[in-house]
Image: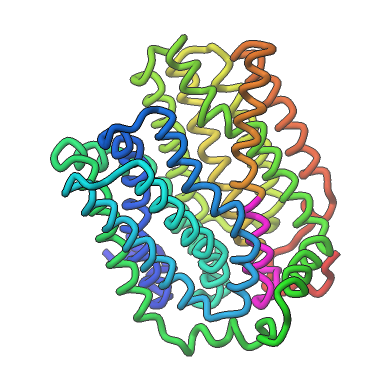
Amino acid sequence: MTRLVPAVLRDEPQYRLLFAGQLLSIFGDRVSMLVLPFAVLAVGGTVTGVVAVSVAQFLPFVVLALPAGVWADRFDRKRIVIASDAVRMVTQATAAATLFTGTATVPLLAALAALYGAADAFFSPAITALVPAIVSPRNLQPANALRGLTFSLGSVLGPAIGGVLVALLGPGGGFAFDAATFVVSVACLLRLRPAVLDAALETATPMTERFLPSLARGWREVVSRRWVLAFLAGWTGYSVLVLPSIFALGPALAARDYGGAPGWAIITAGYGIGSVLGDLILLAWRPRFALRIGALALVGASCQAAIIGSGMGVWPIAGLELVAGICVTGCFTLWETSLQEHIPAAQLARVSSYDYLTSTGFIPLGTLLGGALTAALGLQPAMVLMSAVGVCTALGVLAVPAVRALPRGVTDPDPA
């Protein structure tokens, strides 16, 4: 029976604690993502209100991503992730209470969403830097793959759970569920042994160093490594050129040509299944040149816009999206593992904050670009063009020798 449990969970007791808390918490996040628009509409908001609340949750992440990376390299990362979870627990519990009591308003939900987004901005770089502090080097990739698997399963099952909660309890039920998952996560994080975490902070940024020099130091870590710069450019291209096909243009095309919501659900289910398969593959397979495989996966992932805009029909598109899902989660896992293996622990949070900024911060820009291209060319030509440019960008990443030749390891003696 124990053979059915991934080795990283058997061998890494500290990671088991982190995983147990994050598994439920990620499901809660996916539930709240589905519930949020319904909550806004339930209190009398309009589509404009839904957009405003979504932007309120997103903008703090953009503004705080880089400062959060600096602070995660200067302070105890365990305390940062606990504080982040605690703040998000309070915001979700407050949203649930006001929705249950009928006192929620659109401005209140927007304020809570902004506070949630700010806490999330601090969590992301801190958790990336925390994983190598509690996992042995040989288990870094499976740890990231297993964490990716929770995201994949959460994306598939979270909306279903959220739909049931909304039907039974209203939007407040979804927020209450998310708040409860943060309670579990905090309880697990509190049990992490400080001695395990101390090793990652031995060479941390001196507390006397000012904020701006510390931020600049993180940027120097980025620009001194061509493989990091190349991949950040690749993530930017993917976020600006490909993701809008999933978040905005894809549903619009599905409503017009693919049978509406049922057809889009089949397509997204194909992607979700592919993501799960990709994570399972990387639990067992440890490629010798992780970033080379990651760059190849980025090429496949960048085909998504053209796949969705191909007009081939729901089932062929869903099949290709399954392959794209394998590529996306594979690229993410191998890239994150490469950062953890090669970036010094004292600068890892700062470097990863640039990753989160480029992979998340430019999504609104891509949505605007997608809308402009659609207005000029039409839906399908715009999506094919965006994919073509995205694939060219990904091929450019693959062409960088430092990307193809980066070995496995836990140190980076030659930053270039």
The residue nearer to you, when weighing 402 against 248, is: 248
Picture layout, residue 35 above or below residue 261: below
Identity of the residue drawn at 53% across and 80% down: 76
Query: What is the quadrant of the C terminus in the image?
Result: bottom right
Determine if the magenta segment contains residue 50.
no
Which residue is depicted at the point 60% across and 39% down? 363
Instruction: Residue 332: give x, y in percent of width and height.
Output: 58, 50
Residue 154 seen in the figure: no
Question: Of 321 and 354, which appears nearest the observer?
Answer: 354
Q: Is residue 402 visible?
A: yes
Residue occupying image coordinates x 52% and y 12%: 312
Locate residue 179: give its quadrant: bottom left
Position in image of residue 333 (x %, y %): 56, 54
Q: Which range is magenta?
A: 340-357
1 versus 387 height, above or below: below
Residue at the extreme left: 168
Q: Main secondary structure of the magenta part?
A: helix
Choose between 140 and 49: the one closer to the eye: 49
- At horizontal 35% and vertical 36% (from top left) the residue drawn is 37
Q: Could you tell me which quadrant the N terminus lies in?
A: bottom left
Residue 252 at x, y percent in the picture: 48, 18
